[in-house]
Amino acid sequence: MGLSAGGLLTRFINHVLPKKLPYAYVICGGILAGIIIFDLIPHSIKNFDFKGIFLGVFLGYTIMLFISHFLPHEDDKNVSEKTVAFLIIAIFFHHIIMGFSYGATELSHNPSFLTAIIFHQIPEGIAIMITLLIARVKTLSFIYIITILSIVFGISALLGQTFKDSGRGVDTLLTGGALGTLIFVTFNEIIGKSKNHFGWISLLLMIAFGVTVIIIYHSFLVSNFT
């Protein structure tokens, strides 16, 4: 639901301000950076072993870097199908972890907790749709992507309920790996390639705006759903 809402919001923005989509893409990078800094990293450190998280981040980032090295380079484009693929992989792993955590927690039957997860998915839906639009991938792909992610979340939640506290080390490593892949996509693919198309001041302002959106957004979730 949250992914769909994010996608619809992006389509609306693209309809009203179609020429501003590249700017929205950089802001999207700021939004993802905000999610990483103010949500995923604090949550991971609080709930898992730091060494395991660090190892997972290192492995996740290194694997993405390794894959990127062997894929065709398109330096003239700030968004390519490779960027789309990397973003989907990162969010895919993130949904596995999120679903597993949702199923394993005692709050899984709490409506407020579920609502918070739905709101948490909105920025991810925005990121996916913006990337698809700029890379000129058919938007029908968005429906396929969010359907697969929803199924992955559901299966992971069932596994989380089944195994509960078992396999904590694997869960920690996967969480770090998901974080590492998202860090790579955000800072190497989105922000890293956008710097060739915008001035530094404009780039930093757009990133700061995206991060600020998440700070306000996260404060809203904390105050209303905790």
Image (cartoon, rainbow, N blue to C red):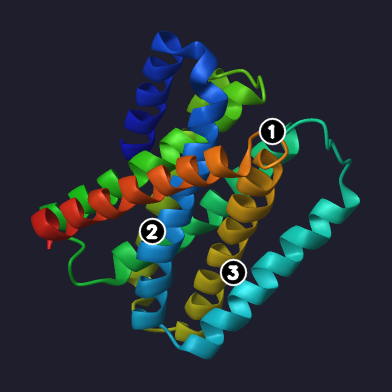
* SS class, disc 3: helix
Residue ID for mark 1: 197
CA neighbours of label 2 inside 10 A, class few (<14), some (14 to 19), many (20+)? many
Number of numbered discs visible in the structure rendering: 3
Q: Which mark is residue 99?
A: 2
Instruction: Give me the C-alpha separation between circle 1 and circle 3.
Output: 30 Å
The residue nearer to you, when weighing 177 against 20, is 20
- Which amino acid type is marked by label 2? Gly
Instruction: Give me the C-alpha separation between circle 1 and circle 2.
Output: 37 Å
> As drawn, is 163 to the left or to the right of 33?
left
Query: Is disc 3 in contact with disc 2, using a CB cutoff of under 8 Å?
Result: no
Q: Residue 226, how many percent across, how many down?
A: 12, 63
Q: Which mark is residue 188?
A: none
The answer to whether 153 is drawn above or below residue 106 in the figure is: above
Callout in the foreground (1, 3): 1
- Which amino acid type is marked by label 3? Gly
